Amino acid sequence: MEIKNLRGWSNIILWTSLLFYVSCSSSDEPAPVDCNTSTLAVSFTSSDPTSCGTSNGTITASATGGDGPYQFALDAQAYGSTSTFTGLGAGTYQLKAKDKNGCERTTTVILKPFGSTLASTVSVTTDSGCKTASGVLTITASGGTAPYSYKLNDGAASATNTFSSLAAGSYSVKITDNTGCSITQSVKILSGIKLSVEIESIINANCAVTGCHVANGGAVSFAILANIQSNAAGIKSKTQSGEMPKGGSKLPQAELDAIACWVDDGAPNN
């Protein structure tokens, strides 16, 4: 009788181990692609607006390398198959390309204001923090004809070139000189959460553990930072739902927030 019981317990332990192994080697997890070494590249052709006050500039994007098909986006727009962007005023734009593996590349495109030397730079001097609004950005205008006015998103134009108490996200700034000539520029404020600091420590403590998400553990190894970055969206989704970590309790809210903030920042390699 004792031998049978021992055999029964052995079977239970074996099946429990197998279930844990399978749970960490989900077949719906594709092999990760290291986007840091991807050959994806984005290029463009452009035409400036034909006068200082018009918005008829164009940008046409193209991509090579990586793994097509490609999608494109301008500034904070959603990705799509359209590669030509029209109706653009003078300013600085961030042109983005993404391949089917989710790898992204970004390049800066400057459309010049016709007949004017007006230019600007925008710098983020303070990150927003995670789930807080502590971001600060400063706009520096040059050329054209001073004095300048500054406008953030749909706010009122003013002589103030510094904006504070900003949450993480994308913003549009407009600079206008004394002749009425204007340029626009987009800027993204990040939370400041870092992959190599907050995110790596959370994953190492909860997911890159024996039998799950480590080398030979039956799943994508999260001991490699590039794999965390490549699977960022899935990690956010599964930790928020409680599906990760496997077999344990849901992560503390502060850690869930940190993961979400980092992913919403674009899962940067920082």
Image (cartoon, rainbow, N blue to C red):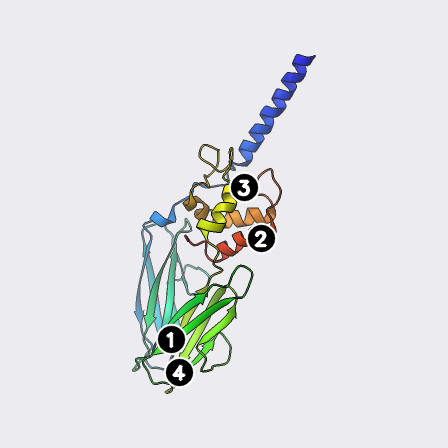
Instruction: Name the amino acid, label 3.
Output: Asn
Residue 111 placement: quadrant? bottom left
Q: Alpha carbon of mark 1 to alpha carbon of mark 3: how far?
A: 44 Å
Residue occupied by mark 4: 148
Residue occupied by mark 1: 140
Q: Position of residue 107 (x, y in %)?
A: 34, 62
Looking at the rendered structure, the secondary structure element under dot 3 is: helix
Q: Alpha carbon of mark 1 to alpha carbon of mark 2: how far?
A: 36 Å
Looking at the rendered structure, the secondary structure element under dot 1 is: strand
**For the residues bearing labels 1 and 2, Cβ distance under 8 angstroms:** no
Q: Position of residue 155 (x, y in %)?
A: 51, 77
Task: Specify the label residue 254 is tagged with.
Answer: 2
Looking at the rendered structure, the secondary structure element under dot 4 is: loop
Against 249, residue 129 (above or below) is: below
Question: Callout 1: few (<14), some (14-19), or many (20+) C-alpha neighbours within 10 Å?
Answer: some
Question: Callout 4: few (<14), some (14-19), or many (20+) C-alpha neighbours within 10 Å?
Answer: many
Which one is in front, 164 or 184? 164
